[in-house]
Image: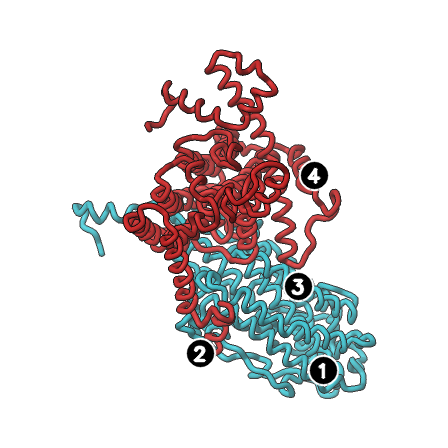
Chain colours: A red, B cyan
Amino acid sequence: MPLGLQAENLHQFFVQASENWAQRFAQEHAPFLTHLPAPLGELAIMLACCVIFVAVVPLLPLGLVLAERKVSAHIQDRVGPMRVGPHGILQTLADGVKLIFKEDHIPREGDRFLFVVSPYIIFACSFAVFAAIPFGQSILVSNLNIGIFYIMAISSVVVMGVIMAGWASNSKWSLLGAMRSAAQLVSYEIPIGLGILTVVMLVQSLNMQDIVKGQDGIANWIVFRTPFTFIAFFVFFISAIAEVNRTPFDLPEAESELVAGFHTEYSGMRFALFFIAEYANMFAVSAIAATLFLGGWHGIVPAEMLPQAGILGFVLRAVTLGGLIGVVIKTLLLVFVMMWLRWTLPRLRVDQLMNLCWKYFIPISFFNILGVGIWGLIFPTDTLLSIVISIVVIILGLILTFGVLGKSLSKGPSNSAERRISATT
Amino acid sequence: MAAPEQDSKIIELKPFTDEMIVSMGPQHPSTHGVLRLELKLDGEVVRDAIPHVGYLHRCFEKHSENLNYQQIIPFTDRMDYIAAMNMNWGFCLAVEQLMAKEEGKFPGVPERGEYLRILIGELNRIGSHLLSFGTYGMDIGAFTPFLYAFRDREKILLLFEKICGARLTYNYIRVGGVSRDTPPGFLDEVKEFIDYFEPQIDVYNSLLTANRIFIERTANVAVMDAEMAINYGITGPNLRGAGLQWDLRKDETYSIYDRFDFDVPVGRDIPELGVVSGDCWNRYKVRMDEMKESVRIIRQILDSGLPDGPIQAELKAVRPPKGEIFSRSEAPRGELGFYIVSDGTPKPVRVKAKSPCFTALSALQELSRGLMVADIIAIIGSIDIVMGEVDR
C-alpha cells in the first residue's frame, strides 16, 4: 500500500479506525456524531479518540518519572522523594509546576525558530507512536494495516527533533550530543527494523492487531515461537534501549561528558517536554516489545480456556497477563528492566556503541531473518511439534551459552573476572 | 603516506574536517572541580587537550609567609580537602623535620600520637579512595557506585567528627602530635566500620571493577608506562598503576610505618581482560587494592591497641631553626612535598608545596591526544585530581 494521504487510503484509514472502542462509545453516548455526513462523522470520532488518548497518555511519564526515582533510590540505598504527598507520590507534579514557572530561556545566538519547534517535534512523535499500539482487542486509537511500519516511521522522526535542538542551541555540547544522537539513532534503527522484520515474516502482516492475534497463550508468544525470534527479542529490546537513549547507551545526553547533551540549553517547560518525551518513548518501546514478542494483550493461558465475560473474566485475564492490564504489566516489567540497567551499568563509548550495533546486532539480525525464513519453510504452520522443537532448542541454546560463557557465569560474571584477575597475579 | 594530488581517491578517503575548540570547564560535571580543558576536537576525536588551571588559586604559599606555623595547618586542610588529614600530616612532618635539625629543639612525636596519626591517616586514605572510586564510576556513567561510596565515606566522616569535631577540614594533626585524644569507645567504632567495610570492597569490585563495560571503557586507555610516569614526576597510585612499586610509606619510611605489615599494590598486565599496566583501569584498581592495605594497617593498630601516653610532644614554641627542608609524605594522591625556608622566626620565609595532582595533571595533555571525548573523562577520573591541591 503506498504511503501518503490519498483519498482512497484516507477512507480506508477511517474505516479501520472505526473498528475501535471510541466509535462504539460515540454511538452510545453521542449519537449525533453518527448522523453527520460519513467522513465528517469519522473525523469527529477520530478526534474524540485522540482527545481521550492525549488526556491519558501524558499521565504515563508522570508515573514513570516517580517510578524511576523510587527504583533508583532503592537500588542506591536511599528512599527517594518523600516530602510531597504520601511517600512523595506527588513529587513529579510539584516538579512540573516548578518547571512551568521557570524562565523560558532561548539562547540569543541560537536559531530561535528551530529551538522553539524541536521540543514539540520530539514530544509529538513520541506520543504519536501510541496511536498504533494495541492495548486490548478494541483499545487502540487506530488499527492501521501498516501499524508497525507507521511506528517505525514516526519514531524515526524523533532524531530530526534531536538534531534541530542540538543545532539551534548554538552550544558545542549540544551539537556534539545531537551528532552522537543522530549516529546512534540511525544505526540502531536497523537492528530494530530487522527484529521487527522477523516478526513480520512469521505473522505475514504489518497490522499490530494481526501480530497480536496469533499469540494466544504463552506457547504462541512470538518470542518462543522459533529460536530465532527468541534471539530477535533480545536484540530488539537492547536496540530499543539504545533508541530511547538510556544507559548504557545514553551517549547523546551523557551527563558526565556532554553536560546534558542536546538539551543542555533548554529550561522550563521546553526541557520538561524532552523529559516527558523520553519517558513516553521508554513506555512506547516497551509496549511495542511486549506487543511484538510477548503476546500483547494475549495472556499466558489461551483465551478460550478462560471465561470472557464479567468481572471474573477480567480479573482472570489480568492475572494471566492478558487484556489491558496484562499489556501494561508486561510493559512495566520491561520498563523496570530498563531502569534497573540504567542504575547498574556504566556507559559505552561512541565507537563501542557503533561496534555493538554494526558488528554484532546487525549480523545477528540477518542470521535471525535467514533462520526464520528457513523455519517458515520447514513448518509452514505452527504445530505442536514446531513449538516443542522451538522451546527445546531455546533451552538447549541457553544451557550451551551459559555453559560456554562460563564456568565463569556460574558464580556470577563479576566473581569470575575477579578470579581471573587474582589468577594472573 | 603523502598522497599525490592527482590521486583523488585518497583525498576522498581522508576528508578534512574543521577542528572545533571546546572549552570543557571550569563548570563541567566531570572535571572534578574547576579545571578547564581547552579541547581541540575533530568530531569526537581529541586532537589536543590543554589544561588551564588556577581557578581555585587561593595564594596558600604567599599566605603562609605571613602566618606562624600552627596557623598554616588549617590552610593545608584546604589543599586536598578530600584527604585533609594527610595534608596536615605532610606539613607537620616538614616542620618537625626542620625543628629536629637543631639538637634538643624537637623531642619527637609521642608513641600514641604516631599511632593516632597513622590510624586517622589511613582512614582518610580509605575515604579519599572511596570518593575517587565513586566519582570514577560516575564519570564512566554508572551513578550507583557514587552513592555507595558516599554512604561508606559518611561513616568515616562521622568517626572524624567524633575525634576532632570537623567533617572536612580537620586541623587535627599538629606539630608534635595530634590535637585531641580518642573519645571513649572510638576504637570499637573504628573496628565496627572496618569489619563492615572490608567485605564491601569486594562488593564494589564485583559491581564496577569487573564490569565488562567498565573494563571496555578503561582497559588499555591512556597507557602511561613507568618511564613516562617518572619523566612527568608522577607519584602515588598513578605511578604504582604503571607497575612501579614505589611507596614512601615503605621505601622512605616515615612516622612508624615500618612497624606495620602491608603490601604496595601495583598495576599489571592482564591479557584476559585486555588490561595493560599503566592504563586507566590499573590506576583505578591500585586505589581499590590500597583500600584493602589501609584496612590491614588499621587492623594491626586495633589489634595492638593504642599505647598509653601523651598525644602531643611538649613544645615551648614552634620556632624552627634557621635553614630549609624538603619533606615528603605519601598522601592518597601521591607524594606530597613541602619545602620550607625558615629564618628562625615563628613565621616561615617561604613555603612551597609540591602537589602530586598538579604533576599528574601535567601528563593529561600527552595522555589524551588522539583519544575520544569520553576517554578524556576517563583519564581525568583515573588520575584522580583534586583542584584544591592543584591550584592551592
- Residue lying at 62% horizontally and 52% vertically, measured from the top left: A71
Name the chain letter of the residue that bears numbered label 4: A
The numbered disc on residue A424 is: 2
Work out how far the residue at label 3 is from the one at label 2, CA to CA, in angstroms: 36 Å
The numbered disc on residue A94 is: 4
Q: Residue B18 lies in what quarter of the image?
A: top left
Q: Is residue A113 left or right of residue A268?
A: left
Rendered position, A237 above or below B73: above
Q: Is residue B245 left or right of residue B126?
A: left
Q: Is residue B29 visible?
A: yes
Question: Which amino acid type is marked by label 2?
Answer: Thr
Residue placed furthest toward the left: B6
Please tell me how crowded label 3 is: few (under 14), some (14-19), or many (20+) other residues with Cα within 10 Å. some
Mark 2: secondary structure: helix
Rendered position, B159 above or below B21: below
Of labels 3 and 1, the one closer to you: 1
Question: Which amino acid type is marked by label 3?
Answer: Tyr
